[in-house]
């Protein structure tokens, strides 16, 4: 990609009170006008149907150029939104780069033709690839700032390790870098805005929030989104912030505001919020017509505030440039935009074959043999101790502890995961360590910088994890109950799992989300017992793991942590402390590759494909089937649901010619539907009977145990399905 660091960047080094020189003012004008010229050229191309979408930054140029010139590309971190064309140009993205995205070229450096125009991205400039989802990027900026602070306090964590994801994540940090996060005023209504403000404030993070207030969110005016119509008034009481409310049509006011904000952040005093009042001179996008909802008088009033017209008048009035010189400059910038468009239109589109690239890491395959250290060490046995049968809860905790000792890039946070946020209490209390105690003792051993409580906000947990992971860290976060994962769904689906593909492999967020899931709790009720794994296996880019016993949980969690993809690690609450599936401590290097099912019971008459809490229930059913009916059932424990072990399923079905797919989740549209469909499709000739499924009733899990028992599949349910299918 082409990188052109602006000449006006010298302004960034000037003290806040300095007035820009004449030369800097001309450069500011050049950048502002270039942004408008690229917008106008794109609009022409859209009308000629040569590109497919256009959204402009017209009216926002002054605010954005001021911001860019106060900050340091390739040093600070940038989380722009779609209107930030002038910001990105001023940081060093070229008009040609922008046009490549508009035409959807293979060489589009931001996304390789995958994202709409204006979804900026540049690794060398530290412009992090963003989505179209409004306000999600604010939490990424927070996580990014936390990671920067972490590395400056733990520089040894930046060291690469060829044995895991770290090999593919270069770390850079300076100690005083900051993150800029931009957002429209309408999008400050999103919970993620408030969740980001919360953590930035509480942790005094070096994040500048830039609210670009053009008074509208598509057709919705500011007073509908913001009570009282002014976001500055609403946020004024957040502690540790430096606030600026400015005329965003004045680039010099913007430059000075961002210089002051940056000084506050770099000094470690906390975050800043710059609220710039701008105008939206064009409609929201070319798919919108603002004449449908704005009065003519209002539009005309905005037009009079056009920051480019104002700056032009100023340059002439101050005797910096003559009108003819400005005309000449503008002509050359129009020419530059047109030339960039012409070149981009000749650039070929991506190949169809490239579509599946970068869904997952191309560098580190978690199904590979290197993760197959399936021979447990039995370290306790070797040391002469009698091996202890540890629970799944114990061996998950042990894995977290071992990995944290090995890899300083791991941080653990979530609701209640710390031993005690008020550290002084630790002298007299045992510590909480998670509502299921899975993280017990970790804060005590590794300190509150590595193990800490988050606010009670699930999007905050996952959104920050994206930011951490983008910087090369390994957040291993906890969502307290699967039933409460939904506020984080937007971050999981549209950000965590997607950032690698949408940036054509430039950015990735290989975080681990641990989630207690499932029922059979006797009283767990609706909001502590649900399943729903198939909703997540339906997300490309995400790995989904669901162990059924202590040893698998230990080995699979290790792979999840060391691998280079985001992983949803589902832990069945009922299995945490069951007698079934306990195991000796397998040592600190024990790992199990993803996508390898385990035959937990060999058999010849019928295959039962299952996972999670249905594994022990299927074993009971198989035992009864053998004893009472002479049916020999083969049970496959899938262990990972995405990827899953098709070869193991196919081999078993080819042997037994009968198959049941059983899971705890609801039958309809459940995980088994996909597996059953694929078996019917690809193994039809091997089947002596239809593919059967077992699942829960198509309802939620009730509180009353009698109802819960009826709703969830029991060993008897599975036994009945086995007997029925064998008779078929
Ligand atoms: C989460 C989410 N909801 C809805 C949309 C659709 N949408 C795109 S832009 C927009 C308005 C944003 O307004 P504002 O934040 O004021 O930014 P502006 O476009 O005015 O600069 C909406 C509703 C979206 N992209 N993301
Ligand atoms: Mg707006």
Image (spheres, helix red, strand yellow):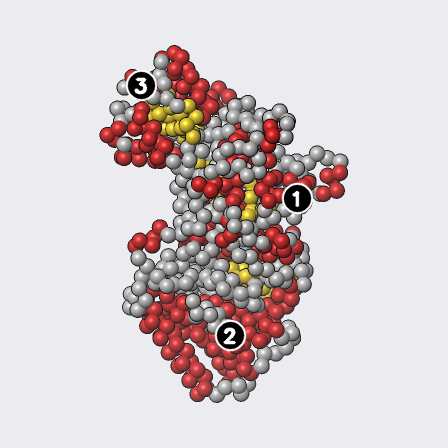
Q: Secondary structure at mark 3?
A: helix
Task: Give the residue displayed 29% in from the left and 25% down from the top.
Answer: 657
> Comparing marks 2 and 3, which lies closer to the viewer?
3
Nearer to us in this view, 417 or 689:
689
Nearer to us in this view, 179 or 273:
179
Q: Position of residue 254 (x, y in %)?
A: 57, 70
Badge 2 residue CB within 8 Å of ligand 1: no
Q: Position of residue 239 (x, y in %)?
A: 67, 55
Residue behind mark 1:
446
Q: Residues within 10 Å of mark 2 (few under 14, many from 20)?
A: some
User: In the image, 344: left or right of 192?
Assistant: left
Q: Residues within 10 Å of mark 1 (few under 14, many from 20)?
A: some
Q: Residues within 10 Å of mark 3 (few under 14, many from 20)?
A: some
Q: Which of the marked residues, 1 or 3, is nearer the chain's N terminus?
A: 1
Up-down: is 431 above or below 358? above
Q: Which of the marked residues, 2 or 1, is nearer the chain's N terminus?
A: 2
Residue behind mark 2:
6
Badge 3 residue CB within 8 Å of ligand 1: no
Task: Give the residue displayed 30% in from the left and 66% down from the top.
Answer: 50
Residue behind mark 3:
726
- Residue 38 is labelled as none
User: In the image, 708: left or right of 403?
Assistant: left
Q: Position of residue 262 (x, y in %)?
A: 62, 65
Q: Secondary structure at mark 1?
A: helix
Q: Secondary structure at mark 2?
A: loop
Up-down: is 154 above or below 386? below
User: In the image, 567: left or right of 407?
Assistant: left
């Amino acid at each position: 990609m082409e990188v052109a660091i602006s000449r006006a960047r010298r302004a960034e080094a000037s003290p806040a009170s300095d007035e820009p020189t004449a030369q800097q003012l001309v450069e500011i004008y050049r950048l502002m006008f270039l942004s408008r010229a690229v917008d106008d050229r794109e609009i022409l191309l859209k009308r000629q149907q040569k590109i497919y979408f256009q959204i402009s930054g017209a009216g926002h140029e002054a605010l954005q150029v001021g911001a860019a010139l106060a900050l340091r590309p390739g040093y600070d971190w940038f989380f722009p939104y779609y209107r930030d064309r002038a910001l990105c140009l001023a940081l060093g993205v070229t008009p040609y780069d922008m046009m490549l995205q508009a035409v959807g070229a293979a060489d589009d450096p931001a996304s390789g033709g995958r994202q709409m125009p204006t979804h900026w991205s540049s690794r060398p400039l530290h412009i992090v690839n963003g989505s179209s989802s409004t306000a999600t990027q604010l939490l990424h900026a927070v996580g990014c700032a936390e990671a920067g602070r972490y590395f400056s306090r733990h520089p040894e964590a930046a060291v690469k390790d060829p044995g895991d994801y770290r090999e593919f994540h270069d770390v850079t940090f300076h100690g005083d870098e900051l993150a800029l996060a931009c957002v429209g005023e309408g999008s400050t209504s999103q919970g993620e805005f408030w969740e980001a403000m919360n953590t930035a404030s509480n942790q005094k993070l070096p994040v500048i929030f830039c609210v670009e207030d053009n008074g509208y969110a598509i057709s919705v005016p500011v007073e509908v989104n913001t009570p009282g119509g002014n976001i500055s008034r609403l946020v004024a009481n957040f502690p540790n912030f430096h606030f600026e409310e400015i005329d965003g049509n004045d680039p010099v006011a913007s430059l000075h505001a961002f210089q002051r904000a940056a000084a506050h952040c770099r000094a470690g005093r906390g975050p800043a919020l710059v609220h710039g009042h701008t105008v939206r001179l064009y409609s929201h996008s070319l798919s919108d017509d603002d004449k449908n909802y704005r009065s003519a008088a209002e539009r005309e009033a905005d037009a009079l505030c056009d920051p480019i017209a104002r700056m032009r008048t100023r340059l002439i009035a101050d005797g910096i440039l003559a009108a003819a010189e400005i005309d000449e400059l503008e002509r050359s910038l129009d020419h530059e935009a047109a030339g960039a468009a012409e070149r981009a239109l000749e650039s070929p589109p991506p190949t169809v074959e490239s579509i599946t690239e970068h869904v997952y890491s191309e560098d580190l395959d978690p199904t590979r043999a290197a993760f197959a250290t399936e021979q447990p060490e039995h370290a306790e046995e070797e040391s002469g101790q009698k091996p202890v049968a540890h629970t799944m809860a114990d061996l998950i905790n042990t894995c977290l502890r071992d990995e944290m000792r090995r890899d300083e890039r791991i941080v653990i946070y979530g609701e209640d995961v710390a031993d005690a946020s008020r550290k002084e209490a630790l002298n007299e209390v045992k510590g909480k360590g998670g509502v299921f105690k899975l993280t017990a003792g970790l804060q005590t051993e590794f300190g509150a910088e590595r193990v800490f409580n988050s606010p009670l906000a699930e999007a905050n947990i996952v959104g920050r994890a994206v930011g951490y992971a983008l910087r090369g860290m390994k957040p291993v976060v906890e969502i307290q109950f699967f039933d409460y994962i939904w506020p984080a769904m937007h971050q999981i689906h549209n950000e965590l799992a997607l950032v690698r593909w949408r940036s054509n492999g430039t950015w990735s967020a290989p975080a681990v989300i641990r989630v207690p899931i499932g029922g059979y709790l006797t009283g767990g009720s609706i909001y502590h017992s649900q399943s729903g794994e198939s909703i997540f296996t339906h997300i490309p880019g995400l790995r989904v793991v669901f162990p059924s016993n202590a040893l698998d949980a230990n080995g699979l969690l290790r792979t999840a942590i060391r691998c280079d993809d985001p992983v949803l690690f589902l832990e069945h609450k009922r299995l945490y402390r069951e007698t079934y599936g306990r195991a000796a401590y397998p040592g600190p290097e024990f790992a199990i590759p993803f996508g390898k099912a385990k035959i937990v019971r060999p058999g010849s008459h019928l295959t039962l494909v299952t996972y999670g809490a249905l594994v022990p229930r299927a074993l009971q059913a198989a035992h009864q089937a053998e004893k009472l009916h002479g049916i020999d059932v083969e049970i496959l424990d899938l262990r990972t649901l995405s990827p899953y072990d098709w070869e193991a399923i196919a081999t078993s079905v080819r042997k037994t010619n009968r198959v049941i797919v059983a899971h705890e989740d609801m039958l309809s549209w459940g995980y088994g539907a996909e597996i059953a469909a694929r078996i019917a499709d690809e193994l039809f000739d091997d089947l002596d009977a239809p593919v059967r499924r077992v699942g829960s009733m198509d309802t939620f899990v009730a509180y009353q145990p009698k109802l819960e028992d009826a709703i969830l599949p029991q060993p008897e349910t599975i036994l009945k399905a086995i007997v029925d299918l064998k008779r078929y």
